Image: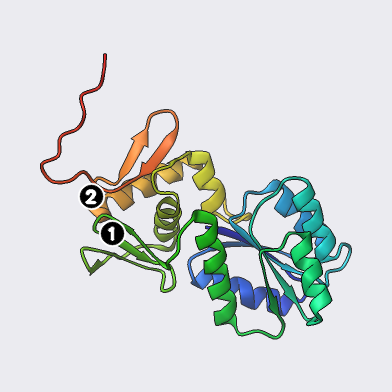
């Protein structure tokens, strides 16, 4: 999952980005409203953390422009302002949640998880698919109760596929959501990580949909037969 942090306080932006990366996310950072607006308007983020008091363009203006342009990415606004009228202005501009500074990083992470859950239609921090469970709070995966050892990119890939179970996800979409802006992207790398993940799962959960991408779904039940394709 790929996130954008728009925060002009560089120390705070760094702390937030590091915490999010440790939690298993790919993270881009912008330090003013103009750069933040451009990234949010041109890149497919899964969620955005947006400060209100930004230079060049304030956060409310940035958010309003995204929503008017049809950008529906979930947005959590950060603000040092605690007046109710400013919170209302943020929600009216299209925010999905807000957090007042100073804040505890664990609360920020919890609110981000909640945004991503709601966007994907999930009610729990634990995603399941057949014998596989993914604890997004602890960034841990188990299969039949046994822990899976995953690299950071393997975890991101698994998390994205599990958040989109049953849907066909293209290689391009995976590339856009797994890597941050500075990563040297290569679509062929996705195939390598899918292959590694298949071996570690030991289950037939990742289906290659020819010409379209991949679909993640529970493995077929033991003894079940595949339907005969029509001529």
Q: Nearer the viewer, mark 2 or mark 1?
A: 1
Q: Tell me if residue 35 can be seen.
A: no
Asked if the residues shown at circle 2 and circle 1 are in contact, with their CB atoms under 8 angstroms apart, the answer is: yes
Is 211 located above or below residue 107 in the figure?
above
Viewer-nearest residue: 192 or 160: 160
- The residue pinned by badge 1 equals 132
Viewer-nearest residue: 172 or 99: 99
Q: Tell me if residue 25 can be seen.
A: yes
**Mark toward the start of the polypeptide (2 vs 1):** 1
Drawn side of residue 203 relative to residue 127, left or right: left
Return the x and y of residue 12 as percentages of the image width and height: 69, 78
Secondary element type, mark 2? loop
List the single residue furthest toward the left: 223
Return the x and y of residue 220 as percentages of the image width and height: 21, 43
Return the x and y of residue 169 as percentages of the image width and height: 46, 41
Viewer-nearest residue: 173 or 63: 63
- The residue pinned by badge 2 equals 203
């Amino acid at each position: 999952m790929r996130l954008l942090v728009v925060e002009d306080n560089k120390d705070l932006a760094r702390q937030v980005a590091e915490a999010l990366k440790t939690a298993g996310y790919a993270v881009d950072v912008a330090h003013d409203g103009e750069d933040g607006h451009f990234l949010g308007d041109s890149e497919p983020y899964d969620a955005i953390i947006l400060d209100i008091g930004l230079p060049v363009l304030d956060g409310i203006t940035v958010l309003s422009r995204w929503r008017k342009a049809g950008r529906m990415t979930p947005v959590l606004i950060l603000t040092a302002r605690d007046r109710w009228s400013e919170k209302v202005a943020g929600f009216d501009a299209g925010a999905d949640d807000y957090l007042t500074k100073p804040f505890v990083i664990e609360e920020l992470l919890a609110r981000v998880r909640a945004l991503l859950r709601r966007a994907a239609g999930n009610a729990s921090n634990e995603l399941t698919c057949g014998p596989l469970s993914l604890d997004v709070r602890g960034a841990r995966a188990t299969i039949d109760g046994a822990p899976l050892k995953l690299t950071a990119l393997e975890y991101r890939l698994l998390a994205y596929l599990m958040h989109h179970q049953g849907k066909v996800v293209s290689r391009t979409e995976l590339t856009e959501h797994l890597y941050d802006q500075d990563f040297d992207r290569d679509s062929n790398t996705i195939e390598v990580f899918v292959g590694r993940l298949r071996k570690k799962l030991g289950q037939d959960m990742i289906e290659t949909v020819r010409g379209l991408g991949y679909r993640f779904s529970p493995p077929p039940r033991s003894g079940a037969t595949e339907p005969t394709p029509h001529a």
